[in-house]
Image (cartoon, rainbow, N blue to C red):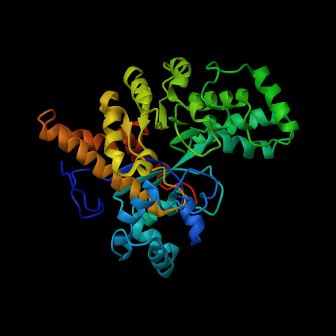
Amino acid sequence: MPTDVPGGGPGFDDGLPPLVDHHCHGVLRHEPDPGTFAGYLTESDRPPAAGTTFFDTQAGFAVRRWCPPLLGLPAHCPPDRYLARRRELGPDETRRRLLGATGIGAYLLDTGLPGDLTGPTETAEAGGGSGFEVVRLETLAERTAARAHDAEEFTDALARAVQDAAGTAVAFKTVAAYRHGLALDPAPPAPDAVRTAARSWIAAGAPRLTDPVLLRHLVWLAVATGRPLQLHTGFGDPDLRLDHADPALLTDLVRATADTGTDLVLLHCYPYHRQAAYLASVFPHIYADIGLTLTHTGPRAAAVLAEFLELAPFGKLLFSTDAYGLPELYVVGSALFRTGLAAVLGAWTASGAWSETDARRVGAMIAADNARRVYGLAETARAGGPAAAGP
């Protein structure tokens, strides 16, 4: 296992198969202004403090380390020079160059965010891979409510919408951590409780969905399909309470879903990644990923990855970038994963704790094989399923 990965793109043999980015988002089709670009380097939804810039973060430094050479500039060049080069190339060529250098072969893209963003097909084509859709439950419910006249029509239409989505999407995702927190009652809500909650929500104009009864209902509708269910845990933007996003709060729900045949995938997890690793170690249907975390921890990514691997079974960890808005975040997420994994497994191999054969096998599992198994990607491809879903 090499310990120095100079780019992680095509042509560099680090022993890994094409990566499966099992949780990501579309990127902007237009060229962002400098302030908008910098805003994607942070989870904050607010402008930087006076006299500061979001380029002065681990994510900002990582972009300047890994991305300029892909656009014909020296690594660590000043942000203004990098953004000027980006404007010269235009968004399409920038996207093609950056995504084409990630070594990602499959993109499982959450289509639930608004904005002029690329869909699964467009994103994957720019990167030379395959695209798959992940359906965000709360967005699906809000769109369904906008077309319903009453609670009964909504609940019937929602059940059909989830079933229809399961026919094309490879997974569902919930952001209940943002909308309520993860300490949800683990039991499926009774039909009368669902209709009562839906009636109140629709009467209020169906605003952003935060009702815990409806959030639980969505979770159980998704679980009933058998598709994997992704759950946001850990840090994110200020819309959540970090202490309400600890994956350990899901323990009762994890127990309640243990015999359903549906896998739960805990996203991000940091700084509660050890709790997530514990859940993955004791419950067969629990998986965890390291997406988003590595981008925002920069050169400490290897340490976080090593902490995940302290307890999580090696067949239970998945790779993702959680890239959103900027193709640069795909580059950074994949590069920091490659370099972090090489450093961790290389050190364990050099110490004699691991064999090189096992290190390469586990690296391939985390990079792609685990996700292909969990999401049934090989079976989907053979069956001619949604290999390029979305716009």
> In the picture, residue 169 is in which quadrant?
top right
Q: Residue at x 51, y 62 (%)?
A: 326
How many numbered discs?
A: 0
> In the picture, residue 195 is in which quadrant?
top right
Residue 138 x %, y %: 67, 40
Give the quadrant of the C terminus. bottom right
Q: Nearer the viewer, residue 238 or 20?
A: 238
Residue 295 x %, y %: 42, 51
Residue 268 x %, y %: 47, 40
Residue 45 x %, y %: 63, 52
Image vertical order of residue 92 relative to residue 101, above or below: below
Q: Residue at x 19, y 44 (%)?
A: 346
In the picture, measured across the screen, residue 12 lies left or right of residue 111, that is left
Q: Is residue 334 visible?
A: yes
Q: Nearer the viewer, residue 370 or 301?
A: 301
Q: Residue at x 66, y 55 (%)?
A: 114
Q: Is residue 118 visible?
A: no
In the picture, measured across the screen, residue 120 lies left or right of residue 19, that is right
> In the picture, residue 157 is in which quadrant?
top right
Extreme residue toward the bottom, this view = 88
Image vertical order of residue 276 relative to residue 360, above or below: above
Q: Nearer the viewer, residue 315 or 249?
A: 249
Q: Residue at x 25, y 38 (%)?
A: 362
